[in-house]
Image (tube, coloured by chain):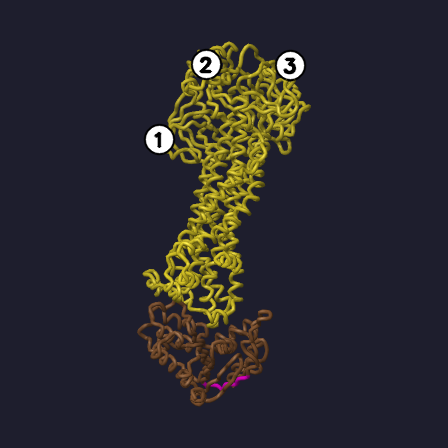
Amino acid sequence: MMRRKLRRSLLRRPGPPAALAVVFALAIGAFVGIRGAYGGIGESVLRAYAELGLPDLVADVAFAPTSTADLVAAVDGVAAVVPRIALDTTLVDRPGVRVRAVSVPREPQALGRVQVVRGRALSGGPGEALIAEAAATAQGIEPGDVVELRDADGAIRALRIVGVARQPQHLAMIPPNGYMSTPRSFSVLFVPEVEARGLLGRSGGVTSFDIGITPLAAVDDVAREVKRVLRRYRVTVTVGGKLASVRNIRSHLEALRAAALVFPLFFLLGGVVGAQILLGRLVRDERAFIGLMRAQGVGATVMAGHYLAHAGVTVVAGTALGLPIAFPLANAIRLIFASDLGVPATGAALDPGLALAAGVVAAGAALVGAGRPAWVAAQLRPAEALRPPVMASPGRALRRSRECVGGVRARLILRGMTRNPARLAMTAAGFGLAVTMAVAPAFMLREMGRVERRVDAVRTYDMRAVPNGVQGETWVAGLAAVVGVRAAEPVLELPVTVRIGAVDVDTYVLGVPENVRLLGVPVPSPGTALLADGLPSPGSNVTVTGPLDSIRLEVGGRVDYPLARPVVVSLTDAQRLVSLPDSVRTLLAGALGTAVLGASPVTSALLQAADGRVDEVARRVAALPGVARVDTVQVEKQDLRRIFALSRAFIGIIELFALLLGAALLYATVSVSAAERRREFAALRMLGMSTLGVGGLFVAEVAVMAVLGWLAGVPAGWWLARMALGGFPDFLPGGIPLDPLMALAVGGGALAVVLAVATPTVVALGRADLAAVAREGSL
Amino acid sequence: MAIDVRATSRVYAGGPASVHALRDVDLAVAPGQFVALLGPSGSGKTTLLNVLGALDTPTSGSVWVVGRDLATMSERQRTRYRRFEVGFVFQHFYLVPVLTAEENVLLAAGLVHAKGDARSWLDRVGLAGRAHHFPSQLSGGEQQRVAVARALAKRPRLLLADEPTGNLDTSTGTQVLHLLREASDGEGCTVVMVTHDDDLARIADRVVRLRDGRIVEDGCATEAVARDRT
């Protein structure tokens, strides 16, 4: 009998339970989908690292004799060493595309193995190359294509692509000093050693070592010893896990893992709140039924079980709806990440264990939500339940609001909301959750748009020319004389350690000339520094330590610098960090070369080309001796747009889920709210109040609730978005500002959704059978 | 006539189990008359009251009240009719629980922009001292008196009362009946009251008895009640 009653209860007013089932479906779909995608991608990345041998350490040197590999191998704790030659250059036929050519030893490698996924392996002879999979996909390069590279001497060398490959150090295409995977503008080519030597123009040496350590060795100790052994070759040792590509992939996976946890958690919270509201009001509505059943001898446990079964049915329906959503979601996320990060794309499969876990967690959430109403139903005494419900004595807040500003209708709205503080809190929580879920992805999307606009505003140059080694300002003057170049400005970028307060931060310094026009940043006066957003809060001074000197600068303020967090200083201050005193310079000039020790060194030149001549000028500048590469801003921006497009797709999916969940939760809350007060509203209509008038009262109430939810949801959503993007401190260093306009827009949107979901309820109020209500009990 | 009901039926459709709540009812009530609708449960008296109050629509026939044909009114017109012409007093009071006694009266008066002080209406029903109390702080009799004050505050031409003393003890019920009588006598209101208690019907000018949806008796209250007793 109770089963029949349960079925009829659900069918009598199917909207709210259906909406709750949708909430659970979205939670289960999001959890299984995102978690499944994370599991699949994470597993395939780890497998790739294990199968292909990700080095524990990578030691980069300027140039060291091949025999130094034996020195490294002799370090205590080192198990394997693979010496390599790497050269950063550009593709001649694709302006703006940077290339890192990495040598592949002829013999099988213990570490950093190259796995050919299309085409064939290298034969070992010159003129051949493999291209990294992510770059091949992004740039449309296939086996059989020929690419032209500029070697270290500026000569052009043609290489035939014989295959597409992946290597654990270079799954994601992160250029040197870069933060983002930019496979459209950065490629990794794997070339035979003989070809690498040809490109470098030097023989008998190497530029890096892939190092594997023994299982019991401490990475830091080995790194320290390797550094000591290779010190004279200007060595930089990087732990395998901190290689740019690995770090980037891990950041994304971490963000995906967090998303797989946080978003479904919020969705489930929505389910808890929804179940509590729905069941709480159902129990209040069915007091007489409960009293009757209890009077007829139905036990408290059966009564509680009946209402828990309500929640159980919604979870079962939610699971049935959610699991079919999960699989395409996991697949979509997997494709987005595989394409974005260059990780192996493994097929997504629905993990039965995960699905079961999701179902169990959702059931747990539903039981938590339904627990209290079920307990209340079980505790109701028959006589009490059978008495017509009487409104409890008004609380203090209600009595105080007696003299509130506004007419009777305003009091009706205010007291209608506040008469049951628990209900008000639950409803506002439901609204707040809906807003939180909708606002967090919106903030993330907005931040991406802001960064894109900021990049446009800052990078006002057409291209950036990077020299071979450090050059002087005269080199920039030479570039300015190239046909088609309208303006050329020097900049100096150096890795530095900045002491801000008591904190040392590894970042880079950006030195800009006083009259800079091609970089949209404020120019600090000499002696002062501008700290990019994302760096710690400054005191009044910072100490910047560069390769050759350390200077103390006054903090001139903050600068909103996109995609990085440099310390912006004047060019002259930056040059002090790499300049030797004149006497020392004179002494060393003969040994190291004047360019390195020049009086006014620069690391790149920003160029502006005449209208419509960017590609032509880029080719011309790239062909100049001393120019290592030319990066065009157009390609950089295309890369950024592509990366953001993929991120947007992922966040967009979350946003879609959040909006559906928000609407479902709001609908359930609003319709249950209206159903609970059906008789009260009908009484007002019997008095002669129009449907519009009654609907207005109801809409005003839910609108106030929506405002309360908005007040709680916007900060919560902001926090959630900051947390979600917090995994990318280099990528999005400025955090997410709490934009009032955005908050207002979200509030407007939430209000619109509330009005939209309230409309059918108001229509139902208008159609209520007044005669039937008149025959019912008290309000 | 204040009320002119002709050949009115109300059928609640339910397939073969349709319920004929009213069957060809004819009823005319003069302005200011106090009519009691008597009858056993299921006789159709509340349905007739609901039809007169435009809470329900007849399946057939015509229902003219204060010069308006309720059977052909739009929903908007029915709302306006309820607002300006009718005052309701229900068995379960239907006071708005979050409004005080005074505010309940003010709400109704505000709907018709009626002049007059809500407090004076409460005074007339003997509740001036309870104006700031919420319904839950009032006894059943007090709540029903507030309901009467609320109904009268709109200065309706028709006052419809459905078992107004059903939830009250005898003494309190008598007080409420006297208020309805005063409304009829003092305000010139046409009052139609549903009851199943012959003794209460005695206060009316006229008793209309229904059975199975038909009017089976229509006459002077005292005569009708006396006849029923014999």
Disc 3 is attached to a residue of which chain? Answer: A
Colour of chain B in the rendered structure image: brown
Which of discs 3 and 1 lies nearer the camera? The answer is 3
Q: Is residue B180 visible?
A: yes
Residue A237 image position (x, y, % from top left): 46, 20
Nearest the eye: A648 or B158: B158
Q: Which residues are magenta?
A: B26-33
- Work out whether A479 lies above or below A380: above
Cα separation between marks 2 and 1: 33 Å
Q: Quadrant of residue A544?
A: top left
Q: Which mark is residue A230?
A: 2
Q: Residue furthest right?
A: A144
Residue at left offset 57%, top offset 72%: B18
Q: Is residue A621 visible?
A: no
- Work out whether A706 lies above or below A234: below
Q: Which residue is mark 1?
A: A501
Could you classify mark 2 by the number of other residues whose Cα lies within 10 Å: few (under 14), some (14-19), or many (20 or more)? many
Disc 3 residue type (three-letter): Gly
Residue B217 image position (x, y, % from top left): 50, 86
- Label 3 element class: loop
- Label 1 element class: loop
- Work out whether A506 lies above or below B111: above
Residue A131 image position (x, y, % from top left): 61, 24
Chain shown in yellow: A
Disc 2 is attached to a residue of which chain? Answer: A
Q: Which mark is residue A316?
A: none
Which of discs 2 and 1 lies nearer the camera? The answer is 2
Disc 2 residue type (three-letter): Leu
Nearest the eye: A226 or A664: A664
